[in-house]
Image (spheres, grey):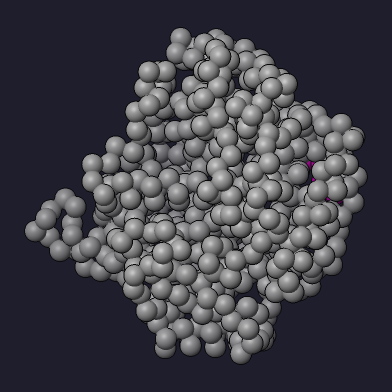
Amino acid sequence: MRAAVLHGTAGSLLLTGLVAAPAGGAPAWPAPAGSAEARGTAVAAERAAAAGVRFGTCAKEERLPGNLQCGTVTVPLDYALPDGKRIKLTVSRVKATGKDPHNAKHKVPRQGALVYNPGGPGASGMYFPLIGFLPEWKPIGAAYDLVGYAPRGVDRSAPLSCRDPRRLLKAPLESPTFPSEAYKKERIAEAKAYARGCAQRSGPGLRHYTSLNNARDLDVLRAALGERKLTFMGASYGTYFGSLYATLFPSHVRRMVFDSAVNPDPEQIWYRNNLDQSAAFEVRWADFRAWMARHDKVYGLGRTPEEVLRSYEKARAQLAAKPAGGKVGPAQLQGAFLQAGYFDDYWPQRALALSAYLKGDPKPLVQVAGPHPEAAAEQENGSAVYTAVECNDASWPTDWRVWDRDNTRLAQVAPFETWDNVWLNLPCAYWSGPRQKPLDVRTLPGELPPTLILAAERDAATPYEGAKELQRRLWGSVLVTENGAGTHGIGGGPNKCVNGYLNAYLLEGRLPERSAACAPHAEPKPQAPDSRARGTEGAKDAKGAAASKASARVATAKTVRQAP
């Protein structure tokens, strides 16, 4: 799911010798073209094409505004048995406006449906179509029906669960940078219990929640939408099963955008990618601390990154002794600052919260880091899907000593995320279901239409090496890099250069002859204490507010994962 090394540190040397080969059975994957799964996909797509999607008013349970239309698409749970159990995926849409945002007199011809996935695994794209109301997306929304959906397992699409959502509200929690042996034993026991809970609550169908089936579902959705060929944009994890789709169904592709690409090398899926992600987050954490240091006059957290780190560690120690508001402990603090590693527009708010807390006002920190009961069920569901897909997709080390060795060494140079990432993924060491052998993503010359890859050079969640590896594997793909930046998910964001390449590709099918680079977007401006009450959406009407919410939901869904 991610990949890179610590730039300019011992981390790059450390990671080269870290990992032992994961253990476990590995059935052949993907199934050959004439397999039962391939035939089942063709059968399901044919049925979906005949049935279409009956779009109408969205169900109240979706909690979506009236701007959207909703429908469902039926897919097999097991593609080898297309006449067996079937599940329904929820789909949302805003139809192409046909209006040129720069010339009201000019009608824009419709180019079909643009299907979007925000990542995860475990994220829903149901809010995505509302993003077409934002200025950056209006040209695309004029030409395309914007289509989002909830992948299998997510929301109301045959949802998965691994435990009672109310357990997520247990707070505050610890988050030791260098855990004791006793603490490790506690987390091992929790990981085992979580893996058992997934199997017990989700039943035997759990084994069919995989990236390969997500790619197959995407082809059935294409057919249901009446599209002969697919136009798709995937972010983060969406780039991974998008690349599986490109490998399995290259003749079904019209245009594909891979935004913040996962490293698809089979050897990286998923254990090694998570090690590399932990290393990369240390770099981005250093970027954030340097920014706070440059704005010491506003926040008072320190004039150097090292001084800022001491302020952060002081807050951790105080929260361990006395949680803020009785709700926020070290784990909640770390989670809030991990989000800032994904998106630099979170930096001002997070820095302000830390500053206020250390000056005696815990309210801003509780607001950004505290538990949200209304979101517990959604978070638990997202975590269940994340775990099921990553555990099913590939073999993981089953010997705790491998995890302990690799991450103890990594934490010496990359302590910020390392152990929390371990606890998130450790249920895969004790997973009872069958494991698959990852597909060797690769296309031959002329097999796949040219595709666009977008990547920020300092992205921590899906580090830059993953984008370069994907480009090597997809013939004819072009990589556009935002140099010196680290935001996760850059398409349709604040960088006009990146958006220019995105629009040229989606609207005209035009790509640069070779890989291109954009200067970084502007760093966020510091947020003074007296400005924290002001809203950040800036929307002036209902559509603008909905679109801003959609943008936030899409961005958050790409990345936020809850530890078991």
Q: Is residue 83 above or below residue 247?
A: below
Q: Nearer the viewer, residue 528 or 218?
A: 528
Q: Is residue 360 above or below residue 489?
A: above
Q: Is residue 19 magenta?
A: yes
Note whether residue 116 is visible. Answer: no
Residue 540, horizontal then vertical, whole percent:
23, 41
Q: Is residue 49 above or below residue 109?
A: below
105 to the left or right of 214: left
Q: Nearer the viewer, residue 303 or 355?
A: 355
Q: Which SS type dominates the magenta stretch? A: loop
Q: Which of the 4 image quadrants contains residue 496?
A: top left
Q: Nearer the viewer, residue 468 or 100?
A: 100
- Magenta stretch in the rendered image: 16-20
Q: Which of the 4 image quadrants contains residue 147?
A: bottom left
Residue 132, horizontal then vertical, whole percent:
31, 55
Q: Which of the 4 image quadrants contains residue 536?
A: top left
Residue 80, horizontal then vertical, whole percent:
67, 84
Residue in the picture at 51% in, 42% down: 488
518 to the left or right of 172: left
Note whether residue 171 is visible. Answer: yes
Q: Is residue 349 above or below residue 42?
A: above
Residue 229, horizontal then vertical, whole percent:
41, 75
Residue in the picture at 46% in, 83% down: 48
Q: Is residue 160 magenta?
A: no
